[in-house]
Image (spheres, grey):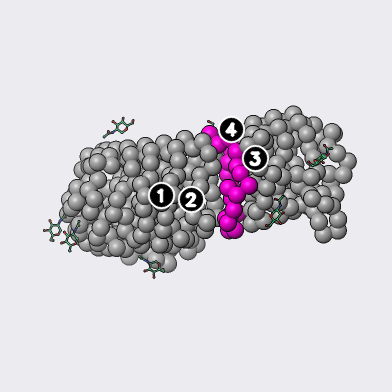
Amino acid sequence: MDISRILLLLSVCGPTWAFTLDLDYGGVPLWINRFLGEPSVLTLKDRMDPGWFRAVNTQSCPLECDCPIQWPTALYCDHRGLTQHPSGLPSRTQYMFLQGNNIAILGSGAFANATNLRWLILDRNQLLSEQLDNVLFSNLTHLVNLFINNNNLTRVPVGLPSGLKQLRLAYNRIEKISEGAFQNLDNLTLLLLQGNRLTTIEEGDLKGLGVLNLLDLSHNLLETFPKHLPPSVQQLYLSNNSLTGLSENSLHGFNRLHYLRLGHNKLRNEGLDHGAFNLTSLVELDLSYNQLTEIPTVPTTLQYLYLEVNHIQEFNISSFCRTVGPTSYSRMKILRLDGNKLEYHKLPPDWVFCLRVLHNIYI
Ligand SMILES: *[C@@H]1O[C@H](CO)[C@@H](O)[C@H](O)[C@H]1NC(C)=O
Ligand SMILES: *[C@@H]1O[C@H](CO)[C@@H](O)[C@H](O)[C@H]1NC(C)=O
Ligand SMILES: *[C@@H]1O[C@H](CO)[C@@H](O)[C@H](O)[C@H]1NC(C)=O
Ligand SMILES: *[C@@H]1O[C@H](CO)[C@@H](O)[C@H](O)[C@H]1NC(C)=O
Ligand SMILES: *[C@@H]1O[C@H](CO)[C@@H](O)[C@H](O)[C@H]1NC(C)=O
Ligand SMILES: *[C@@H]1O[C@H](CO)[C@@H](O)[C@H](O)[C@H]1NC(C)=O
Ligand SMILES: *[C@@H]1O[C@H](CO)[C@@H](O)[C@H](O)[C@H]1NC(C)=O
């Protein structure tokens, strides 16, 4: 078989965009940089006959894994019932796929020779915190993406490499973050902790995360709006907790916060201070599936407001506009109020002057 012709075929059929999108279970799509030669698939499952890779690729490859010729630095060992990490990892490996196995233990030597690793995908295994060696990641100075979603971790792994940009720990059983757990992660932009058992965030827990952009704490057991969050966050997800309110200064200092998701909580108007959402950087606010009876006061710069499925009975223009004039009006584009106790024909007559750039209203 003529390899060069197959390679040409692969490159013609493949996506022509430099950046492609691949979904994974952590909830946020993984951006792939094709200029860096990053693999554009997270699994080879059902794509090609593994025997073919073995036949055409002369490079060493652990028996348990597949080494595709088009991504010579990738090692695909996912979805094959492994209970141990493969031995003899080639030192060329930069992208390692181990998701969908049954691995519970990773000893100190597991990645000792894989010092060039950039991505390590361990989603959907059985990893236990007490079975992760403390120096497991210590040599991985090039690691940027570490995914350990859907495992059995009870704490944040220790000794995380300081070059990490993304750390995904969603759907584990983490109850508590210990002080300084992320201390040296100066470059971390994305941290997923949704689907754990966190009840609180203590003062030192998120210390050191100076450039964190997206923080997902949805689906935990938080009862009060967490303090001590990094002020750099632009996307903050706290849906599916048991929050009852926000105080005047809950969001104080979050001057870059654009997207705030608080759906599926227990928010009530009594728990919300009048100035709780007084933040002009906010673009999108999700308050759906709560227990609100009134529309909270939101900044006039807000563009997307989701209030569906609450107990709202009145629509007061002052929630959106402090005054109405040629330049003072709400920038709202989408307003969802369906699943409340409101009717379109009962809106006050002047609402269109305030919400004058609205694209869609759902009642
Ligand atoms: C690392 O590489 C050395 C030398 O090639 C080899 O002896 C050792 O078994 C390797 N360790 C692992 C865990 O693969
Ligand atoms: C880290 O690398 C050093 C030098 O190559 C090696 O001696 C050590 O065993 C490695 N440690 C781990 C935990 O992989
Ligand atoms: C991990 O959790 C799952 C689901 O609760 C459980 O079935 C499995 O036995 C656990 N694995 C280990 C190694 O404890
Ligand atoms: C953080 O990112 C910067 C810029 O990309 C890089 O120069 C630096 O080495 C990174 N830090 C670590 C600890 O890898
Ligand atoms: C929140 O809970 C609802 C209802 O149980 C569910 O449909 C939704 O997917 C959950 N969302 C998140 C982000 O966990
Ligand atoms: C909102 O914050 C601004 C300053 O950022 C302040 O002047 C204003 O009074 C606040 N409004 C409310 C309703 O708290
Ligand atoms: C709307 O809210 C403002 C401020 O809370 C209040 O003064 C006003 O009476 C309300 N208007 C109606 C029609 O309820």
Secondary structure, magenta segment, majority class: loop
Residue name at image x 27 percent, y 39 percent: 128
Q: Secondary structure at mark 4?
A: loop
Mark 1 → mark 4, Cα distance in angstroms = 25 Å
Sequence-wise first label, 2 or 3: 2
Residue name at image x 45 percent, y 44 percent: 201
Q: Which mark is residue 228?
A: 2
At label 2, which amino acid type do we have?
Answer: His
Disc 4: residue Cβ within 8 A of ligand 5's nearest atom:
no
Is residue 116 shown to the viewer in this render? yes
Sequence-wise first label, 2 or 1: 1
Residue name at image x 43 percent, y 46 percent: 202
Mark 2 → mark 3, Cα distance in angstroms = 19 Å
Disc 2 + disc 4, Cβ < 8 Å: no
Residue name at image x 84 percent, y 46 percent: 352
Residue that badge 4 annotates: 266
Ligand 7 position by quadrant: top right
Direction from residue 49 to residue 12 in the image, left or right: right
Sequence-wise first label, 4 or 3: 4
Disc 2 + disc 1, Cβ < 8 Å: yes
Q: Which mark is residue 205?
A: 1
